Image (cartoon, helix red, strand yellow):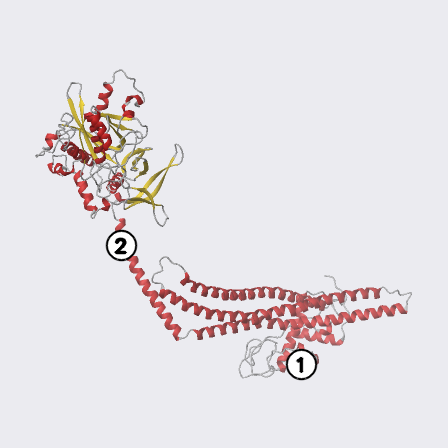
Amino acid sequence: MNDIQSPQLPASRRAQAEAREHISGVPTRAHHTSGFPAVRSPHFLLIRLGWGLGREEGREEGREEGRPAGGGGHWPGVDARGRRGQGVSAASPEPTAREHSRPPHLLPSVLPTQPSAEPRRTMPAVDKLLLEEALQDSPQTRSLLSVFEEDAGTLTDYTNQLLQAMQRVYGAQNEMCLATQQLSKQLLAYEKQNFALGKGDEEVISTLHYFSKVVDELNVLHTELAKQLADTMVLPIIQFREKDLTEVSTLKDLFGLASHEHDLSMAKYSRLPKKKENEKVKTEVGKEVAAARRKQHLSSLQYYCALNALQYRKRMAMMEPMIGFAHGQINFFKKGAEMFSKHMDSFLSSVADMVQSIQVELEAEAEKMRVSQQEFLSVDESVYTPDSDVAAPQINRNLIQKAGYLNLRNKTGLVTTTWERLYFFTQGGNLMCQPRGAVAGGLIQDLDNCSVMAVDCEDRRYCFQITTPNGKSGIILQAESRKENEEWICAINNISRQIYLTDNPEAVAIKLNQTALQAVTPITSFGKKQESSCPSQNLKNSEMENENDKIVPKATASLPEAEELIAPGTPIQFDIVLPATEFLDQNRGSRRTNPFGETEDESFPEAEDSLLQQMFIVRFLGSMAVKTDSTTEVIYEAMRQVLAARAIHNIFRMTESHLMVTSQSLRLIDPQTQVSRANFELTSVTQFAAHQENKRLVGFVIRIPESTGEESLSTYIFESNSEGEKICYAINLGKEIIAVQKDPEALAQLMLSIPLTNDGKYVLLNDQPDDNDGNSSEHRGAESEA
């Protein structure tokens, strides 16, 4: 390293340097043969000049104040190495004259002047810049100044970070004030909540009100603490940054400008010519150099004083905010402890006891629910299987109400449909539907006088259809199992009979189903129940004397046995494949047959000319051969056997048709295609009757000629949407018209006794049930006009 020339130090400076060298043990200069000192690093200069001087001054001040030498912040009677002594070290040097000549503001003011009885914590001496070296502005002084500037920069960065941390604490405390305020309001808002299950919350509401008051008091304490933190913690550090650190930064800029001006003036002064000296110019340049040097000296003195004072102020600035923080927290905790009095302790104890009792109840209830859960999960797996018992499901046929999930068929287009799973339940005579999430159910179908039957729909299992009383197709539903399907059909059948309106609907349903489920063995008591329930034809027959027609015979004294009416083991036909249709087709000669199975309109030309046209909606239950047609008991027995066979074999499917009664025939018409399924001459109907208990059941006996010349008897059983008495009345009226057609006077008298429509047809019945006699026609209207 090259040696640089340094100016000769005066005697006083050399003495000070030698003293510092003696105290610190570090030579002031490295002596070379050339006499030039080596350049030292700033940190080394700090140790050599600042730290060594501090140690020297610390020893001198400690000797003056009765402290051990070394300048450290130690207790009285303890030296710099921690050893206890009896006073001042004898080896300590005497204070110098320069130490007594230091300005008062640069002397340490935090140290006690007199030793106290108790230990008092003090701070060690700080490093300083020597003001007397400011004028010379040597490189060593500049190096030491750079160390102080670096320290000030580090202090500025740390102060900014410390301020951010303190502002975060203040922000958290301020947020705590807002949070407790919101918590208090939220506790009071519990009472205003419209809980669906808010029964028994009075105790909770009163407890939360009390807690709200406590939180309000805590909020006051938190607000006071936040204000105290702002005043005693955040504000001092802000003032230190804005006042002290900003002052040092400003003085640094001024010192730099003054140094630059001094350098310029010195450069100008150095360029003065030697040969042509101008006293005036020389004097002006000298004055300019003196002014610049004085300005630099003043700015350096102010800058050095600020940097020296910063070493004291930074220690105070670091501790004063924390003193305010500690005092604020202590004050907060003291007031909080005063607030929680004995009354508060007793209240908290009572609330804790209440919570404990609720916890005990919860544990007991949880144990019950756990046991119940195990019991429910220990059931057979068939409970979860939709159709577990397909072979022989246990079906309850006595239901008058039913509920469960069904799939509803919705038509979305001409040929497209969708199925929606909904919850259905019956309520009185109504079928209700409640979608998932809905509060209540809505009406889907009025089940009074409706019919229900199993149907095949879109290759889906367990479908059934509900048909309205007017014959319009209703809704199609799908059950999840065979058992559910049949129980829904039975329940809707029972409801459609309006059993639910009776005093004891369960008993009535059981009675009706027991009657239907009786064995197919002869039971004469069933026919005895029908003695007093003969349809309106009995009243007519009592006055008719035409024995050839044999519409309905008079009641006999003795009832025949079942074997005399129907042969045992007679098969029952549940589909409409009628021998009468085949017989009529065979005897129509060479008439053209429609390949699509439809009947031509010319097949029944008498329909337009008939005086009687009455249509009823019926469902075919079954037909079977009988032995005799001399009594209506054969119809009752056929009804019993058909219903019993359907119940035993779980047959619920029925074919719906429109029964057209005219003065010439009975026609069964397909309601969808209007194709005639069957046609019976009215003269071949020998017996007809309606059921006494189930008034919607009706049957009639047909005498069919065989190819062998003999005649066969078959009974056909139907279920009607209206009362069976009305169908019997229409058939009886048609037979009366046939009987008087050859007698114009009798026909005219018959037409006068019954109201006619505008086109000359008979008006028979109305849609409302009538309790009067079947022959009464004064209060009847047309039910359906073909």
Q: Quadrant of residue 404?
A: top left
Toward which corner of the image does residue 487 lie, by quadrant? top left
Tell me which residue sits at (35%, 58%) in the image.
197
Is residue 316 visible in the rendered structure shown here? Answer: yes
Read off the residue under disc 1. Answer: 95
Quarter holding the C terminus is top left
x%, y% of residue 732? 20, 31
> Under tag 2, what secondary structure?
helix
Q: Circle 2 is placed at which residue position? A: 371
Give the residue at the far top of this rendering: 590
Q: Nearer the viewer, residue 756 or 607?
A: 756
Q: Position of residue 656 (x, y in %)?
A: 27, 32
Front in this rendered view, residue 164 or 558: 558
Name the quadrant containing residue 266: bottom right
Q: Given the image, on which type of amino acid does mark 1 rest?
A: Pro
Report x, y in % for residue 128: 67, 72
> Quick one: SS at disc 1?
loop
- Above or below: residue 193 compared with residue 397: below
Kind of residue at disc 2: Val
Circle 2 or circle 1, nearest the eye: 2
User: Given the current orientation, which residue lies at the most extreme right position?
Assistant: 276
- Residue 45 showing in the rendered view: no
The label number, if any, that marks residue 148 in the structure image: none
Residue at mark 2 to residue at mark 1: CA–CA distance: 93 Å
First along the sequence among labels 2 and 1: 1
Instruction: Classify residue 87 as left or right of residue 565.
Output: right
Residue 449 picture location, percent across and down: 26, 39
